[in-house]
Image: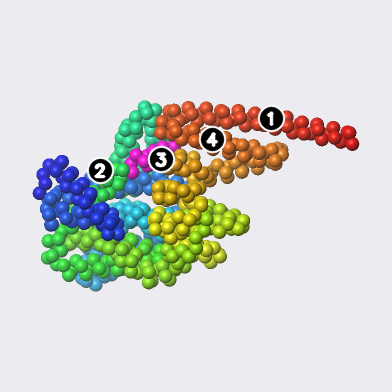
Amino acid sequence: MADGFLAQAIVYLAAAVVCVPIAKRLGLSSILGYLIAGVLIGPFVLGLIGHRGEDVMHFAEFGVVMMLFLIGLELEPAQFWNLRKVIVGMGGLQMVGTSALLLVIFQVVGWPWQTALVVALSFAMSSTAIVLQTLKERGNSKSAMGQSAFSVLLFQDIAIIPILALLPLLVVKGVSVQEQAGHSLIDNFPAWLQTLVVLGAVSLVYFSGKFLVVPLLRIVAQTRLHELFTASALLLVLVVAFMMQSVGLSPALGAFLAGVVLANSEFRHELESDLAPFKGLLLGLFFIGVGASINFSLILESPWLIMALGAVVTAVKFAVLFGVGRLYKMSSDQNMLFAFGLSQVGEFAFVLLSFAVQIDLINSKLANQMMAITAVSMFSTPFLLLINQRVIDPFFGVKQAEPEAGDAVDEQNPVIIAGFGHFGSTIGRLLKANGIPTTILDHDSDRVGLLRRMGFKVYYGDATRPEMLEAAGIEQARLFIAAIDSPETNAAIIETVRKKYPYVKVLARARNRMDAYDLIEHGVENIYRETLYTAVHLGVDALVQLGHRRYSATRQGQKFIHYDERSLRKLAKTRHDRQEYALSVKEEIELQEQLLQNDVYANLLTDDHAWDNSEMKKGNS
């Protein structure tokens, strides 16, 4: 067994470096590589880390907290509010349905109803870390299935709060719940005061994010020390997580709320780029810790019981999730992925079961067996997803859904469009109306099915895969149009195209100026910002409404775009230096306004001169 911090670090990192590439080479997910690494170095195989895996789990769980913070950064408050019905609807149905069925099964087995309810509620939880990481690797985060999975997971994170409050009420013995629980600083407070403290903590996260954190980050940014900004970002997540945990809330949920509050700030992209490496490393440690925590000796004592109960739990969760997906009209392949992806028991089961033991609600032996089932369930998820992808999808999922063509592209055209949502479909319709044939790729099977029913020829496929691009005829294409909603996915595709097919011209979609800067760093020349053209079009109409001639207003709009595109290239060079960037932006705005004012004056002179000439011609005639 390796002793000492450095030796432990070497063991963890070496296991990850060896196992994850092998898993990826075999076509498996990186999560499975981490889990296998944990099993190998754990106390029940090589014994390189002994029983310290639990200590690492406490540290690595911070990776889940960071992941939820970054997800919150990507989800603006308005978008979060729009998802509220899906979160409550899908999440509530999953939690209630799964808990009710498992409760009935456990009571049939003969367990006391209190024990059955505790285990049922624990097993109703899914693994946020495994599901969201899987969605990211597969590029499904923005799909219908990805949004549904995220909604269910978010509801579960919220549900952990009332569940922790409910468990002490189930205790039938005369034990002191407060003394044994000790899971937060407010356990000894009256119920009404606990509620006020919890609401106050959530309000504090919201208002401090808007009125305290952003001004402090501006002060830190003025120091122009990148490492200090990174430290500030880490401190922010740590403080929010600690505060939420202190009042009995989920640290991950608190971090998510903080991310949502900061989603509209100017520091959104920098926070994402600074925290992403830490999140990835800590999540890797988390999965290794899960693999190391599997108690094989306990499993060998009663293997049939644990395996049978684990299979029953997975089957019940799969059935409930599949039914929820059907109710919300998800396509067959997306629904299968949704049900398989969330069918495991999640990391919050460890928290609930441990708390139940502390308050003497269940005995420690049963709790350890349930924790073993939880770990095995999490370990089995990548295998279930692999079976779904390679066996079930081709026969029961994708073939029965609309996008039956899969990766088989039967045409090669001069233009390839990746992403056929509102943005991409507008481009495709314009090109089609002008007789330009295009090959259209989209990774959202629900959208592919809908578009096919509307008469579009769309291919279901992941454009981030080089083999998919080759099947679509990238080697013969003249233009590649990256029109996918996700800037990260767009950037990944563009990097592949520019590296492997540098002779193909790339036209890329950008949501805003910050996304455009990222594309410039990838070497893209032709960038089209959604916000720019829509805003300018509206501005032109505003000028017309105020009395300007349509021709002159349109010409001013075109010149504004020209000047703004030119300044974009200049500003991209200073975007990482906030002080210099701010000064450069101010200078460019002043210069742009002066140029436009000069154009207005020149246009007036030209129009007056043209009017004088026309009047002279009339007089001569």
Name the N-terminal-most of marks 2 and 1. 2
Which one is in front in this view, the residue at disc 3 or the one at disc 2? 3
Q: Residue furthest right?
A: 621
- Residue type at the position of mark 3: His
Per the image, the residue denoted by label 3 is 269
Q: Residues within 10 Å of mark 1 (few under 14, many from 20)?
A: few
| Residue 486, percent from left and from top | 44, 50
Q: Would residue 8 be found to the left or right of residue 257 on screen?
A: left
As drawn, the label of residue 459 is none
> Image point 48% across, 29% down: which residue?
584
**Cα–Cα span, label 4 and label 2:** 56 Å
**Cα–Cα span, label 1 and label 4:** 21 Å
Q: Taking the image as drawn, is residue 361 in sight?
A: no
Q: Nearer the viewer, residue 248 or 151?
A: 151
Q: Secondary structure at mark 3?
A: helix
**What is the magenta range?**
263-276
Name the N-terminal-most of marks 1 and 3. 3
Name the N-terminal-most of marks 3 and 4. 3
| Residue 405, percent from left and from top | 45, 67
